[in-house]
Amino acid sequence: MTKINLILFIILIVIITMFIHGFLLKLNISDSSKFLASYFDNLISSRIFLKSKLDKNFFDPQMKIDLSRILIEGPNEYIRGIYYSSNSIKYVEKSGNNYILYEIPLTLFNFNQSSLKHYEILVNNKIVYSNEISKIGSEYHSNILDSRYLSKYGFEIVVGYKNSFFIGSYLLIILPTLVLLMVFYYILYNLRKDAVSLDITLKNLNIELNKTYEEFKSKRILDFNKQITNNERINTLQKTFIRMFDEFKKILNEHEKTNEILEETMAELEETNAELMEKNLQIISALAEAVEIKDSVTGNHSKNVMDLSIELAKELDVNDPAELEAIKYGAILHDIGKIGIPEHILNKPGKLDDKEFEIMKKHTIYGEKIIKTIPGWDLVADVIRHHHENWDGSGYPDNLKDGEISLRAQIVAIVDVFVALTEDRPYRNGLSVEKAIEIMKEMVGSKFSPELFEKFIRVLKKRGLIN
């Protein structure tokens, strides 16, 4: 092979690898778009993720189901849906003396995974599903090259693509080296007389190539500044590089446009969800007000309980969106069960007798029954059923005590007592904050936990209600 033919052959290899890499990168962008489209379709279709608490014997106390015969700790081969009508994937995680069941319907995986290197679903950074079975149950180790998509349902999807993109990135490292070798060969055998001037040109060319490569790594706009030289072959080579970087610019621009479309779609979904949440809150508030009217409660009792309960939850470092939502709606609807209590008992000015009090206590059970018909509101139902439980086990309806009472129910319970003491009622005026606190101090250890009462006092101080 002659020297000229060798140089032309190397240039041909450069051009071919450039277009192959462009083709592979476009395939990756296309597959990524298809995957995200499938992901959003599933995300807004229905409640696609379920997290259930089981006791140490794999018994679901909420649904009254014994799952010990079909479930084991860790990943499960049992594919038939438990809480879903369709097939699902299940993962059981040890949580203290109990277990947590994560159930994910197979409809989430209705897309072509052939272009993916790996695909995982994370809960609290633990892998509960992976197309690489050996990873299930282990902690996820972050990889800067992976794509992560956060769901509002409490889990993340992690995607790693096959090596086509990275092969192309390696080509960007190899191509400048090939070019330099080719030019070096050219100098040795054909341009010895112009060695000094050519060396300067090559150094500038190398600097420009390295600069362009750094721009590519940092995802900035690619640019290649042509070096001025009288050498016709180097000029031809630079033209090839210019065409190559122009092609990369087009690919990156397409990728940026795809990202912009996805960001706009996410923003629209979040805006729609916020509007629905606001409308739901208005409807729920109206329902709570209807209950208050029947109970002869004046003012915005339920709203006051909700606002103060959210403040106390944040003081207690409750950051889980699901827990905050349960406290919010549980607080505003805590007395919804009073719809089922006769008005002569609700509005009795004096103390209720034993028979009347037994009827009144049923409002917690009625409220739970109403709310449990709403899918996904099990935590809200827990607040409504247990907001009259006492720390020493003397409350109702289940005589729970200490840690058996969920923190969300304890929060609403202590706030409900304070708001009830300080609000005006038809048969009495509201107490001062100081007098209400004095009465509540006597309930510490019996109705409330000492730690919870201390945090509650801190919230009142932040509000400026007490010194």
Image (cartoon, rainbow, N blue to C red):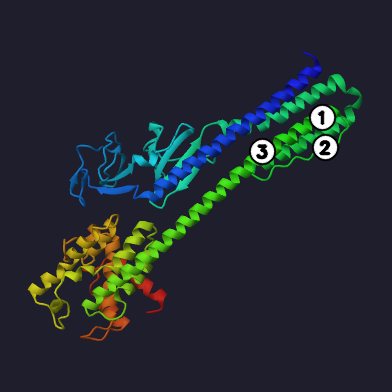
| Residue 313 left/right relative to 184 | left
Residue type (three-letter) at the residue carrying disc 3 = Phe
Compare residues 109 and 401 and report the one nearer the observer. Answer: 109
Please state which amino acid type lies under the numbered disc 2.
Gln
Nearer to me, 404 or 7 = 7
Which numbered marker is on residue 248?
A: 3
Q: Are marks 3 and 2 in contact (CB under 8 Å)?
A: no
Q: Are marks 2 and 1 in contact (CB under 8 Å)?
A: yes
| Residue at numbered disc 1 | 234
Report helix, strand or loop for mark 1: helix
The residue at the point 23 percent across, 60 percent down is 402
| Mark 2 or 1, nearer chain start | 2
Choose mark 1 or mark 3, whichever is in front.
3
Say which mark, if any, is on residue 29.
Answer: none
Which of the two discs, 1 and 3, labels the residue nearer the N terminus? 1
Mark 3 or 2, which is nearer the eye?
A: 3
Q: What number is the disc on residue 227?
A: 2
Q: Quadrant of residue 462?
A: bottom left
Q: Position of residue 13 (x, y in %)?
A: 69, 24
Location of residue 448 (image quadrant): bottom left
Residue 51 screen position, x and y as percent: 31, 48
How many other residues sit within 10 Å of disc 1, few (<14), some (14-19) or many (≥20)? many
Per the model, the C-alpha gap separating discs 2 and 1 is 9 Å
Secondary structure of the residue carrying tag 2 is loop
- Give the vertical position of 415 relative to 34 (above or below): below
Q: Position of residue 85 (x, y in %)?
A: 26, 43
